[in-house]
Amino acid sequence: MDVQDVSQFYRQLSKHNLDQLAELYHPHVVFEDSAHHIEGLAALQCYFVQLYQNVQRCDFTIHEQQQLGQNAFLTWTMHLQHPKLAGGTMISVQGTSCIKFEDGKVIYHRDYFDLGEMLYEHLPLLGRVIRCIKRRLGQ
């Protein structure tokens, strides 16, 4: 297992192949992102099942991948369509994943992305406030 396998998996990830998570992730995996800390393969599988039940579409475009020994990173864009975000239109969020391998599987996976870009900016009232704050910070 290497970063190319992870990259290929995420390019093809959908609600129809979530049973393949066990082929990629170690039983004791730790998965983190801006909103979650998940420990163990069973919990990660539940997370992905819930994620794909609530979204209309979630696809990844992988831009770059690098690996040095058991450590790797990916840069990507997630294309997300959720009925409660941005009026159900597609949003794109750029991010990076830090990955560590053990025993030929992913033991640690940390996603870095702007949670505001993914979530808060696309909520009706809060989105306007967040965008206003970002504009003011940019002045």
Image (spheres, helix red, strand yellow):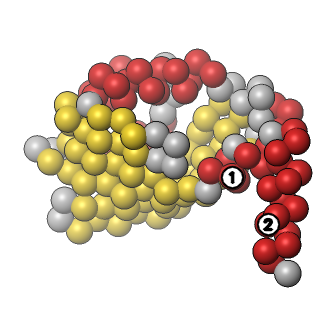
- Identify residue for label 1: 116
Residue sitting at 26 percent across and 31 percent down? 40
Circle 1 SS class: helix
Q: Nearer the viewer, residue 132 or 17?
A: 132
Residue sitting at 83 percent across and 48 percent down? 127
Where residue 85 appears, as percent x and y from the top left, is 77, 35
Instruction: Give the residue type that dot 2 points to.
Output: Lys
Q: Nearer the viewer, residue 17 or 99?
A: 99
Residue sitting at 25 percent across and 54 percent down? 100
Where residue 84 appears, as percent x and y from the top left, is 77, 28
The C terminus: image quadrant: bottom right
Q: Earlier in the sequence, mark 1 or mark 2?
A: 1
Mark 1 and 2 residues: CB-CB less than 8 Å, in contact? yes
Checking the image for residue 39, the label placed there is none
Residue sitting at 61 percent across and 56 percent down? 114
Checking the image for residue 134, the label placed there is 2
Q: Residue furthest bottom?
A: 139
How many residues crowd mark 2 within 10 Å: few (<14), some (14–19), many (20+)?
Answer: few
Instruction: Give the residue type that dot 1 points to.
Output: Gly
Corner quadrant of residue 8 = top left
* Horizontal side of residue 52 vs 30, given as left or right: right
Residue 74 vertical position relative to residue 49 in the rendered view, above or below:
below
For the image shown, how many numbered marks are present on the structure? Answer: 2
The answer to whether residue 20 shows anywhere in this view is: no
Where residue 45 appears, as percent x and y from the top left, is 37, 24
Where residue 88 appears, as percent x and y from the top left, is 81, 31
* Horizontal side of residue 88 vs 72, given as left or right: right
* Horizontal side of residue 108 vs 83, given as left or right: left
The answer to whether residue 91 shows anywhere in this view is: yes
Circle 2 SS class: helix
**Mark pair 1, 2: CA separation:** 10 Å
How many residues crowd mark 1 within 10 Å: few (<14), some (14–19), many (20+)?
Answer: some
